[in-house]
Image (tube, helix red, strand yellow):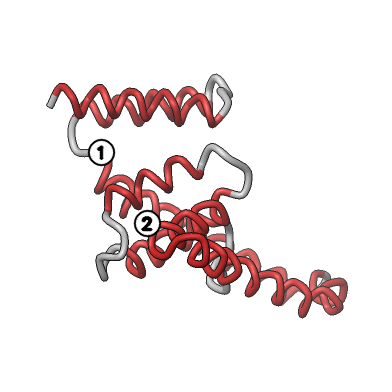
Amino acid sequence: GALVFGGGHVVLPLLRNAVVAPGWVSDNAFLAGYGAAQAVPGPLFTFAAYLGAAISGLSGAIVALLAIFIPGMLALVGTLPFWHGLRGRPDAQAAMRGINAAVVGILGSALYNPVWTSAVLTPMDFAVAVAAFVLLIAWRSPPLIVVLLSAAAGAALSITH
């Protein structure tokens, strides 16, 4: 939680290294949980609870949820009294612009690895990803519907392979 700046997707590679590399959660379970968590509000918190539950049941879910939530909340509470003074300073604004630009690169990296490298393996996988993107962006379809349709397409593709 302390390393999340710019959205939950920034921490995705860190979470993957922390839970997949030691073998606590399989790569497939990681990606499935990540995909399912995107359909609900607060996907990072939901995903953290999912990973905690997958590793250690209810107690793991509670610990993971607290671990992802508390650092950001403490940072918010700690900086809130100074925020009004900070946000008007040109150097603070410049720092925020630089941090935001860096986050764009980190988000691109998080999309590529683990999502793209683990989920888009064939031209049909690519077609499903493009269709999901079009549904979300161009048609503004509800994320839950897109996740369910993508899961169904993935299941159909796995049966045909």
Q: Secondary structure at mark 2?
A: helix
Indicate the amino acid at tag 1.
Answer: Val
User: In this view of the protein, which residue sits in the foreground, 159 or 130?
Assistant: 159
Residue annotated with mark 1: 120
User: In this view of the protein, which residue sits in the foreground, 123 or 39?
Assistant: 39
Rendered image: mark on residue 85? none
Distance (Cα) linking label 2 and label 1: 15 Å
Residue 139 drawn at (x, y percent)? 55, 19
Give the residue displayed 35% in from the left and 24% down from the top: 152
Q: Report whether 156 appears left or right of 152.
A: left
Indicate the amino acid at tag 2.
Answer: Ser
Local packing at callout 2 (Cα closer than 10 Å; few below 14, some 14-19, many 20+) is some
Q: Are marks 2 and 1 in contact (CB under 8 Å)?
A: no
In the picture, the quarter occupied by the C terminus is top left
Residue 97, by quadrant, is: bottom right
Residue 134 drawn at (x, y percent)? 46, 24
> Which mark is nearer the camera, 2 or 1?
1
Give the residue displayed 60% in from the left and 69% down from the top: 66
The vertical placement of 62 against 111, above or below, is below
Give the residue displayed 78% in from the left and 75% down from the top: 77
Residue furthest toward the front? 58
Residue 123 drawn at (x, y percent)? 20, 28
User: In this view of the protein, which residue sits in the foreground, 143 or 155?
Assistant: 155
Q: Report whether 80 appears left or right of 1.
A: right
The vertical placement of 105 against 143, above or below, is below
How many discs appear?
2
Local packing at callout 1 (Cα closer than 10 Å; few below 14, some 14-19, many 20+) is some
Q: Report whether 115 appears left or right of 6.
A: left
Rendered image: mark on residue 109? 2
Residue 17 drawn at (x, y percent)? 32, 67
Give the residue displayed 58% in from the left and 40% down from the top: 40
